[in-house]
Image (cartoon, grey):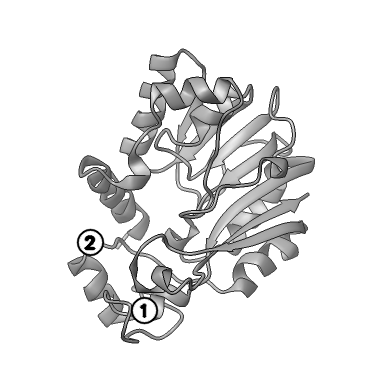
Amino acid sequence: MNYQNFNAKTIDSWCDSGWEWGKSITHEEYENAKKGKWNVLLTPTKYVPHEWFGELRGKNLLGLASGGGQQIPIFSALGACCTVLDYSTAQCDSERLLADKEGYEVNVVQADMSKALPFDDETFDIIFHPVSNCYVEEVKPIFKECYRILKKGGILLCGLANGFGYIFDETECNIKYKLPFNPLKDPVAYEDSIKNDWGITFSHTIEEQIGGQLEAGFVLTNIYEDTSGSGMLHEYNVPTYIATRSIK
């Protein structure tokens, strides 16, 4: 199967059903951002420190797998020149609709981030990449592409799943799956993924994700952990996500 096409259609269906990460910001939130009152998420619950961004006005910013009208409108309100890449039609449509409504320009690119990114070398000052590489089997090539398209001194901000949450069943009380979680190689994981409408997702190690950034040439400058925002692991404050800030 072409799992990326499957995932894109799955996310479209989630958006149609009111998916949390497919809901655009409100007009009030957009106006507040223009006044300097704003926050964005790389991971489920903790806001990204504003100092991670630096000055946004006039900067070329890429939202990588960041469609849905949640972060890019904020960055546009703050004066950044924004491009968003996403493979979901619904997420791309949300970006265009909100930009038309609020009257700002955004370059929307519908593409698959597991392929070579359709941008020239050293195009962007900042890449904002919220949790999404869990939908890609091989993540190191993504970091290499990010390094290629960032300007020298550019900033890569990533939301990453640490893989721990993948070992449990739906109750998060019982261990069910081995790591790495890969439905393309594990028939049980595949069957459960389809049955439960999870999409085709993959666990990734810190070695793959932070190590992958370092191998690409990035220098890690900041990091924090986060929970999923709901469920047993969240209730017990078990971190299952990581946010990173790296510099080219």
Res. 169 image quadrant: bottom left
Label whose residue precedes the other's in the sequence (2 or 1):
1
Residue at the spot 61% in from the left edge and 26% down from the top edge: 36
Q: Nearer the viewer, residue 214 or 163?
A: 163
In the picture, measured across the screen, residue 172 lies left or right of residue 133, that is left
SS class of the residue under badge 2?
loop
How packed mark 1 is, by other alpha carbons closer than 10 Å (few <14, some 14-19, many 20 or more), is: few
Residue 191 percent coordinates (x, y) = 22, 75
Q: Quadrant of the N terminus?
A: bottom left
Which labelled disc corresponds to residue 203? none
Q: Is residue 180 above or below residue 85?
A: below
Q: Is residue 112 above or below residue 85?
A: below
Which labelled disc corresponds to residue 197? 2
Q: Is residue 110 above or below residue 43?
A: above
How packed mark 2 is, by other alpha carbons closer than 10 Å (few <14, some 14-19, many 20 or more), is: some
Residue 237 percent coordinates (x, y) = 48, 71
Residue 129 percent coordinates (x, y) = 56, 48
Q: Is residue 215 above or below residue 89?
A: below
What residue type is disc 2 on? Asp
In the picture, measured across the screen, residue 233 lies left or right of residue 58, that is left
- The residue singled out by tag 1 in the image is 185
